[in-house]
Amino acid sequence: MAKSWYVYMGAGDPTLFSSYRRLTVKHTCLCGNQICAIYAKGEDTLPEGPLSINLQQYIKAALATGALQPERPAGTKKYVYLRSVLP
């Protein structure tokens, strides 16, 4: 199945597929303290659920480190992007 970019809606558990909606334009996110977008299986409004274990681990790592995921190996495609949200 093809993959698409999905934006986190800002509420709910970021490891649940239902917290995302498909992006139709390129995201401009990079780093921050909240999930911005994920690259997940699917081509519909919602990503294919449930999100893969690997993607869930990348989401958790991104929130813990504030870094795009996966971090290694260097140059690898990133599946999780972050954005800054003020408290």
Image: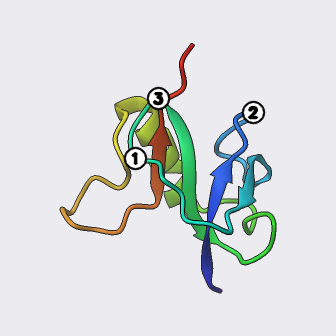
Q: State the residue position of label 3.
A: 33
What kind of colouring is applied to the model shown?
Answer: rainbow
Tag 3–tag 2 contact (CB < 8 Å): no
> Element under label 1?
loop
Q: Which mark is residue 30?
A: 1
Tag 1–tag 2 contact (CB < 8 Å): no
Residue at image position (49%, 38%) is 83
Is 84 on the left or on the right of 41, as rendered? Answer: left
Q: Which residue is at the front of the view, 52 or 59?
A: 59
Sort mark 3 into few (<14), some (14-19) or many (20+) by Cα contacts within 10 Å. some
Residue 85 horizontal/vertical position (percent)? 54, 26
- Amino acid residing under circle 2: Ala
- Amino acid residing under circle 3: Asn
Residue at image position (73%, 78%) is 43
Mark 3–mark 2 Cα distance, whole angstroms, equals 14 Å
Quarter of the picture holding the N terminus: bottom right
Q: State the residue position of label 2.
A: 11
> Element under label 3?
loop
Number of disc labels:
3
